[in-house]
Image (tube, rainbow, N blue to C red):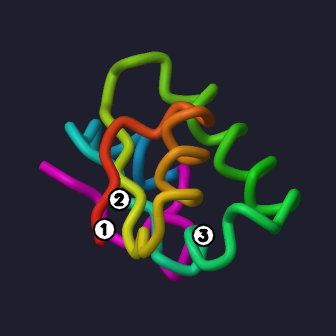
Amino acid sequence: MAIDDFGTGAANISKVCNVNPHYIKLDKSYSRNLYTSKEKQRVISMITKFKDRKFSIVLEGIENYQDLKLAKQLGVDYCQG
C-alpha cells in the first residue's frame, strides 16, 4: 500500500499513522529545484528521519542527476521521474 502525494491535501502524517503504508510518495513539488532549495532539503531530511524504516520513501518528479544524487543523500529510497 502507498500514500501518494504526501505533503499535499489529505496525505499527511496522520494518514501515515492510521494506514501503515509500505511506501510514501512525496509530491513532485518537493523535487522541483531540490538541488538549490535548502528549505526543501530540510523538509525531505525531516521526513526521511521520521520513517524509521517501517516504509520506503519515493520522491516523484526527479528530472536531473543533481536532484537524484541529493535525494539519495537525504535518505530517499526511490526516485521517480
Residue 13 placement (x, y as % from top left): 55, 50
Which mark is drawn over residue 25? 2
Three-letter amino acid code of the residue under disc 2: Lys
In percent of the image, x 71 and y 38: which residue is there? 46
Which mark is drawn over residue 49? none
Label 2: element kind: strand
In percent of the image, x 63 and y 26: which residue is there? 49
57 with respect to 7 (left or right): left
Label 3: element kind: helix
In the rendered view, tell whether residue 80 sits above or below residue 68. below
Which mark is drawn over residue 4? 1
Pick the residue in front: 23 or 78. Answer: 78
In percent of the image, x 42 and y 69: which residue is there? 62
- Between the C-alphas of marks 3 and 1, the distance is 13 Å
- Between the C-alphas of marks 1 and 2, the distance is 5 Å
Reading the image, the residue beneath label 3 is 30
Which badge, 3 or 2, comes first in the chain's sequence? 2
Three-letter amino acid code of the residue under disc 1: Asp
| Residue bounds of the magenta highlight | 1-13
Residue 28 placement (x, y as % from top left): 47, 77
